[in-house]
């Protein structure tokens, strides 16, 4: 029996994790659930999975959550940073699913690693911001970091059983998002509703916008660099609109190994949760006979400059990836609130990156300071745009 804690239990990844727990009750049990302030859904999850600890962001919703549960409910309710740390380090847990959105996932994930917990990692920002620190800490603690992103899960599966010294490059696939075939001249008119309408994947708001700008793929480049300990020159992004080939690995003899499946996150999530076993999910195979073609193309970085910005941050390293991530989070939020146009998202990120004095070999306090500086700059720019 694997005992798990879920950081981000009410998001799309967290809900899928709980679906898998529901399918395999003899394999998994939930000991801790941590959410934001979606107490309605969290209360339902508590009733169904009976965790020993539940965490929300703020004190008020914590009180409301307690009132929503029956008086005999045997669950401790906590809130804030102390609560997230408790969920990440819960004593009986042997795996923490890190699926909080954005930079908020960094410190709880580090707490879980320090507590000796294996990590099923969906929060790519943890490695984008502090990849060197996180991976070094995981090695020190003997902790496994198992990727939940479908692309990184695919790479993980493609390198399994292969000699790492034979690896030539990683081919990271991207759907291209909803605007792959739209002219850049039309980007100024794109609405949040347009950008949230992804053609192949069902995701949360933040990741859907990142997919539309290709920033999500850029963040995944940085994540892959740290997760698989390779250089940015060994990572190539390939647009694959059908989302059947989840990623590929090329070897020095010219062989390419690919992992294929339908565009559904349950396969990648369950593999991280059950590794090295595979669970009988009864997922359908791709309809190979019905697929007319699988196509691949180079990304248009002029039309989608966020990808180039991410490669720049990956190559420069230091504190720049944290600045890229923070600026992007504020820009995406501004776009969703209609304070910033879609085409201005990369402009704002580039401006803040250019303003930043990079700190090489940053400490965790350096990273936090750079993150906050970038957020302050981004909010200032948004304010200027409104005035």
Image (spheres, rainbow, N blue to C red):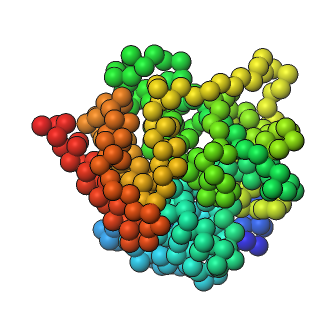
* Residue farthest bottom in this picture: 91
Above or below for 373 versus 118: above
Q: Residue 207, can we see it?
A: no
Pick the front one: 62 or 214: 214
Which residue occupies 45% across, 33% down? 305
Q: Where does the N terminus fall, quadrant-wise?
A: bottom right
Pick the front one: 310 or 108: 310
136 with respect to 329 (left or right): right
Which residue occupies 18% across, 43% down? 383
Above or below for 151 versus 304: below
Query: Residue 205: x percent and y percent?
Result: 45, 42
Q: Where does the C terminus fall, quadrant-wise?
A: top left
Pick the front one: 377 or 290: 377
346 with respect to 308 (left or right): left
Q: Name the image quarter holding residue 373.
A: bottom left
Count the marks.
0
Q: Residue 199, can we see it?
A: yes
Which residue occupies 57% across, 28% down? 299
Query: Residue 238: x percent and y percent?
Result: 65, 32
301 with respect to 18 (left or right): left
Query: Residue 374: x percent and y percent?
Result: 31, 54
Q: Name the image quarter holding residue 147.
A: bottom right
Above or below for 27 versus 305: below
Query: Residue 372: x percent and y percent?
Result: 31, 60
Above or below for 113 versus 331: below
Which residue occupies 23% across, 42% down? 382
Pick the front one: 209 or 70: 209
């Amino acid at each position: 029996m694997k005992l798990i804690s879920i950081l981000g239990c009410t998001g799309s990844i967290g809900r899928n994790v709980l679906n898998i727990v529901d399918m395999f009750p003899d394999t998994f049990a939930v000991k801790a659930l941590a959410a934001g302030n979606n107490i309605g859904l969290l209360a339902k999850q508590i009733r169904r999975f009976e965790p020993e600890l539940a965490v929300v962001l703020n004190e008020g919703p914590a009180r409301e959550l307690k009132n929503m549960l029956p008086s005999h409910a045997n669950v401790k309710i906590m809130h804030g940073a102390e609560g997230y740390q408790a969920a990440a380090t819960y004593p009986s847990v042997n795996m923490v699913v890190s699926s909080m959105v954005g930079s908020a996932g960094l410190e709880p994930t580090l707490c879980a690693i320090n507590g000796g917990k294996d990590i099923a990692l969906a929060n790519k920002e943890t490695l984008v911001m502090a990849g060197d620190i996180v991976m070094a800490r995981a090695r020190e603690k003997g902790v496994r970091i198992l990727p939940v992103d479908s692309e990184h899960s695919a790479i993980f599966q493609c390198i399994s059983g292969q000699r790492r010294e034979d690896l030539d490059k990683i081919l990271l696939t991207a759907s291209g998002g909803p605007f792959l075939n739209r002219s850049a001249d039309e980007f100024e008119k794109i609405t949040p509703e347009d950008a949230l309408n992804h053609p192949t994947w069902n995701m949360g708001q933040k990741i859907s916008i990142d997919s539309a700008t290709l920033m999500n793929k850029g963040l995944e480049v940085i994540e892959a660099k740290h997760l698989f300990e390779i250089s940015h020159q060994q990572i190539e992004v390939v647009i694959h609109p059908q989302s059947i080939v989840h990623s590929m690995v090329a070897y020095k003899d010219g062989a390419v190994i690919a992992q294929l499946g339908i565009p559904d996150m349950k396969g990648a999530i369950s593999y991280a949760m059950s590794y090295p076993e595979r669970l009988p999910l009864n997922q359908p195979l791709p309809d190979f006979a019905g697929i007319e073609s699988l196509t691949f193309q180079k990304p248009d970085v002029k039309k989608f400059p966020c990808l180039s910005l991410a490669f720049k941050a990956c190559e420069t390293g230091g504190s720049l990836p944290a600045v890229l991530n923070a600026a992007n989070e504020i820009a995406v939020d501004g776009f969703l609130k209609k304070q910033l146009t879609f085409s201005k998202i990369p402009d704002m990120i580039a401006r803040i990156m250019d303003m930043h004095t990079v700190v090489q070999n940053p400490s965790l306090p350096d990273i936090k300071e750079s993150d906050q500086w970038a957020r302050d700059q981004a909010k200032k720019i948004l304010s200027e745009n409104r005035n």
